[in-house]
Each structure stands twice: as C-alpha cells, then as structure tokens.
Image: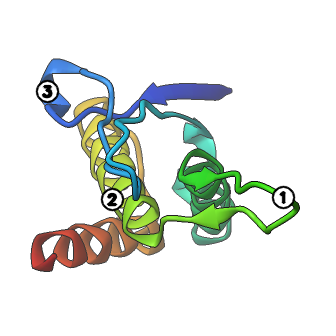
Amino acid sequence: MMKSLLIGAALSAGLPLVAAAETLTPISVTVAYDKELLASNSGAEVVLDSMRKQARDACTTPRSLGRSPMVDKACVNDVMAKAATKILRKQEDEGLETAPAFAQAARLQTADLGQR
C-alpha cells in the first residue's frame, strides 16, 4: 500500500516541511512511500532511494539560459532527515516492523541534521 506523508517542521503537528533553498524560499514536501517495504532491509533501501529522489526533486531549482538545475544539498539533507524521522515514528506508533537499515538511516540522517 502506497502511503503519502507530509513532512513537517513541527512533526507532531503535521505542518508542512519548511526547508530553506538558496533563495530562502520555504518549500512543502509530501513524501510517498510504501510502509510494507520498510519491513525488510532491501525494501527499506527502495524506500530510502525513493525518498532521496523526491527530496532532490523538491530541492532543485531551475536556472536560466540552459544552465543545469541547482540542487540545494542542505535542503535535501533536511528533507531526508525529517522524513525519515517522521516515518520511523509513524511505524513505531502503528506497531509496524521496521528494518534495521531504515532505522539506522533515520538515526544517521537525524544526527547529521543536528550537527548543521
């Protein structure tokens, strides 16, 4: 079953995620994922790859005159950390099994976010 999760700066309130792009434009990101895939390490990798792509898409701004788009890596990291944390919390709240690979990635993403 495909789930869609709105990542929030105030995670418990379910508010839209606000991540600063280079021009300090707030963005709101809805990350879609399949919660059943999170039960296995291989499925968790699929979810993480999908989250990364969705975060990159949300944090990419076009440039003018044929220049390649710019990806705000800090924005991508912020979206990934907040999404992983919120998804992990939701899995735990619902009593669903979560693969160690996803739980570890969520902890690493969050630790990285705290160091910025």
37 left or right, relative to 72: right
Q: Nearer the viewer, mark 2 or mark 3?
A: 2
| Residue 74 percent location from the top left of the image | 37, 68
Residue 65 is marked as 1
| Residue at the image position 34 percent from the left and 75 percent from the top | 104
Distance from the alpha carbon under mark 1 to that under mark 2: 29 Å
Q: Are marks 2 and 3 in contact (CB under 8 Å)?
A: no
| Residue at the image position 28 percent from the left and 78 percent from the top | 108
The image quadrant of residue 43 is: bottom right
When the figure is inspected, residue 111 is found, relative to residue 70, above or below; the finding is below
| Residue at the image position 53 percent from the left and 54 percent from the top | 39
Counting other residues with Cα less than 10 Å from the Cα at mark 3, is it few (<14), some (14-19), or many (20 or more)? Answer: few
Please tell me whether mark 3 sits on a helix, a strand or a loop.
helix
Please tell me whether mark 2 sits on a helix, a strand or a loop.
helix
Counting other residues with Cα less than 10 Å from the Cα at mark 2, is it few (<14), some (14-19), or many (20 or more)? Answer: many
Q: Quadrant of the C terminus?
A: bottom left
Distance from the alpha carbon under mark 2 to that under mark 3: 17 Å
Q: Are marks 1 and 3 in contact (CB under 8 Å)?
A: no
According to the picture, the residue beneath numbered tag 3 turns out to be 12
Of marks 1 and 2, which one's residue comes earlier in the chain? 1
Task: Specify how the rendered protein is coloured.
Answer: rainbow
In the rendered image, the residue lying farthest to the right is: 66
72 left or right, relative to 53: left
| Residue at the image position 57 percent from the left and 62 percent from the top | 48
| Residue 56 percent location from the top left of the image | 60, 58
Label 1 sits on what residue type?
Leu
Of marks 2 and 3, which one's residue comes earlier in the chain? 3
According to the picture, the residue beneath numbered tag 2 turns out to be 78
Label 2 sits on what residue type?
Asp
36 left or right, relative to 77: right
Q: Nearer the viewer, mark 1 or mark 3?
A: 1
| Residue 64 percent location from the top left of the image | 76, 54
